[in-house]
Amino acid sequence: MLNRLDLRNRPSGWEPSSELPRPTIAGDEPREAVRSIINEVRADGDAALRRLTARFDRVDITDVLVPEEQLAQAVDQVAPDVLNAMRAAIDGIEQFHQHQVRPVESYERNGMRIRASQRPVQSAGLYVPGGRAEYPSTVLMTAVPARVAGVKNIVLCVPPDPTRGQVAPSVLAAATLAGVDRVYQVGGAQAIAAMAYGTETIRPVDVIAGPGNVYVALAKQEVGGDVGVAAAFAGPSEVVVVADDTADPHFAAIDVIVQAEHGPDGLSWLVTWDESVADAVCRAGDELLLSSPRANEVRSTFAEGGYVALVDGPDQALAVVDAIAPEHLELQCRDAEQMADRVNNAGAIFCGNMSPASLGDYVAGPSHVLPTYGSARFASALTVADFVKDHHVISASSETMSTLGPHVVALAEVEGLDAHAESIRLRLRSLDEAGR
């Protein structure tokens, strides 16, 4: 089921990263392919999108934009229990993200008033994967935070389903419920290029958010700087499950499988300091895969990115976790919440046997768009902050100038920026003359 690594009995000061296998993001070939696609879209606009959709998604599209009537009809095509689940998810996502909207903050110092407030970007482009599965949950996990942030124009790119020849109704229904303004039936790196630079149909946006395969993630890296790119490197799915003898082997096994069923290039780890737990989880996983409809995808992920790591104890387990910096971390062990407080690098942490990552994927509230490929070392989940900018408003007074102005002059002179210093000297002389 999983490749086994024995990391026990390592010397003091051992660095886990020296022995842990890690996938590479991509070589030169995928990057060059992505750059070629971006250039093609910039040169040919909608015509390029139609060609690339036919090439990669095997669907001939006439219009890039999904018609409004198709969006409206999609809600009626989705089962009532699924619509109810979407509404429940939206409620949880809204509640969580509303707490991230900061009020205007201000303070005074030396006669100077400083205000900080958030302003939403004007437009956000969301990417939702397709092909192997349909992901209405990702629509909700990206669109709702953008809407809570106050973004006025929210658009969505999603590849059409080759079996239907159009976008799945569940995705369109989710877009309608979440308040997406327009949906475009285009995917891959070409969708990222279109949202970044625009075409005849798609207007360029201010921020792009959403997960995807390696090509999508690389495309976001390529356009970053020309457009805002949210939530670090949101690529193929990852999970690390830390388990001890309190874990249910079937719970641990299914949760290792869950993220692997997204397909290749992901990571699925089990970390334990009890060899009998490792054996039990692997046996349970083999049983579960016998009835899994996505067993081929799981086995493909396990072949290159599935591991069970044996460690000396909880401390070494946490060192391994921090070195991997996983997208999802599950702590199915004693004192899980205390352990969570010691984790430095993880996108989202789930504590206890009844807290599977699946809750976070759908209804918990925090966005399931999380950093992957080790970017949890410096990045976080998608939040309202990805769709807003901080504005700082500074209002100074004569008192401010008299008290702080000389410090500005001193620093500006050291840097050789005389005009900076003179802008203060002029004001200080004015104050001096007025006081005479």
Image: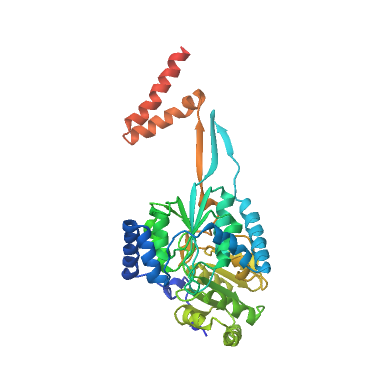
| Residue 242 quadrant | bottom right
Q: Residue at x 55, y 56 (%)?
A: 143
Relative to 94, is 372 above or below? Answer: below
The x and y percentages for residue 147 are 57, 51
Q: Position of residue 341 (x, y in %)?
A: 60, 62
Of 258 and 158, nearer the camera is: 158
Can residue 251 be seen here?
yes
Q: Position of residue 348 (x, y in %)?
A: 57, 64
Q: How many marks?
A: 0
Of residues 16 and 62, the one drawn nearer to the viewer in this rendering: 62
- Where in the figure is residue 55, as x and y percent of width and height? 37, 71
Q: Is residue 99 left or right of residue 15?
A: right
Way the structure is coloured: rainbow
Relative to 120, is 87 above or below?
below
Q: Residue at x 40, y 57 (%)?
A: 194
Q: Is residue 416 above or below residue 205?
A: above
Residue 428 as seen in the image, left or right of residue 384: left
Whether residue 141 is visible = no
Q: Where on the picture, by quarter, is residue 356?
A: bottom right
